[in-house]
Amino acid sequence: MSSYSVTEPSARQKWFAGILVVLYSVITLLPLLWIIATGFKSPADAISYPPKLVFQPTMEGYVNLFTTRTRVPEDQLRALGEPTTWYDKLVRKDGLIITGASRFAERFYNSVIIGFGSTVLCIVLGTTAAYAFSRFKVPLKDDLLFFILSTRMMPPIAVAIPIFLMFRSLGLSDTHAGMILLYTAVNLSLSVWLLKGFIDEIPIEYEEAALIDGYTRFQAFYKVVLPQAVTGIASTAIFCLIFAWNEYAFAVLLTSGNAQTAPPFIPTIIGVSGQDWPAVAAGATIFLVPVMVFTILLRKHLLRGITFGAVRK
């Protein structure tokens, strides 16, 4: 009789699982690859039907993303002489000249400040709150935790009008500080609940040993708990950043100029003949890079955090 393992999958099961993983990867990556490819198409190729899979790559979309252009009469175009840069040459062929820089770089910078600022604030407040709920006898702990969780159940846009009126009264509309505080408030419930689960898994005996050795409570938290909670902190930071980075509704409602982020700006990119889809795709591609890099840098912590959690007894 041949031996059979209930834990080791058979070769057929491995093949089937591999096919499912490959199929899921293709379905997931295909839209992303299409967006990246569209960023290197000309406006005509971007809207052609049937869609072009083979095309002549061009940087026109990226030039249009970072510049503003205007059409001039042909005699004025000739009077300017030969273009001196490759991007000038690229726009001159369409009878255009570059008049200045677009506001995409400013909007992208706003996204970085607001997204990472709210993420850092969420992690700092969430870690300390989660530690308090995990280690101390907080009155009405279960009720407070449920209240914190209930704020996450409510769609944020449901309170958009009260928040708009409150921000207008406090002078926080269209400010970096206002958006950072808002995204922190929305993400804090998720941060507290995720981090509490990780801190619960860290044996309290480690802290007790540190306290016996003469550490203060804060030193035990900083030198014992935090290093072991890095996995949970990294996982939580990624989820908080993704929400703040991609958020659209509040950014449209509460910002218009100084603090407007990239998500509301990218769909409004207009070319000389309508929606400039290559520039929109180029902006979306660049917008993906920071979160992608951040996730790749923390991928080991993210995988461990999702599958195992923190240190177990």
Image: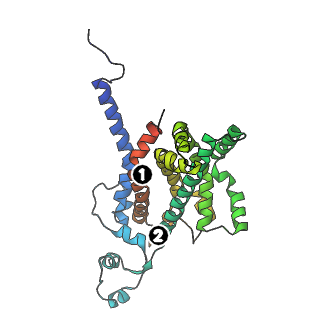
**SS label for mark 2:** helix
Image quarter for residue 182?
Answer: bottom right
Instruction: Say which mark, if any, is on residue 175.
Output: none
Q: Of residues 23 and 168, which is closer to you in this image?
A: 168
Residue at left 46%, top 74%?
102
* Numbered tag placed on residue 104 in the rendering: 2
Q: Amino acid at mark 2?
A: Phe
Q: Which residue is mark 1?
A: 295
Mark count: 2
**Mark positioned earlier in the residue sequence (1 or 2):** 2
Tell me if I can see residue 293 in this picture. yes
Report the side of 182 relative to 14 (left or right): right
Residue situated furthest bottom in the rendering: 79
- Res 137 quadrant in image: top right
- Left/right of residue 20 with respect to residue 313 in the rendered view: left
Q: Residue at x 60, y 56 (%)?
A: 184
Badge 1 crowding class, 10 Å Cα cut-off, few under 14, some 14 to 19, many 20 or more, is many
Where's residue 254, x and y in %? 63, 64
Quarter of the image where the N terminus is located = top left
In the figure, is residue 279 to the left or right of 136?
Answer: left
Q: Nearer the viewer, residue 119 or 126?
A: 126
Q: Locate residue 203, reporting x and y percent.
A: 52, 36
The answer to whether marks 1 and 2 mark residues whose Cβ atoms lie closer than 8 Å is: no
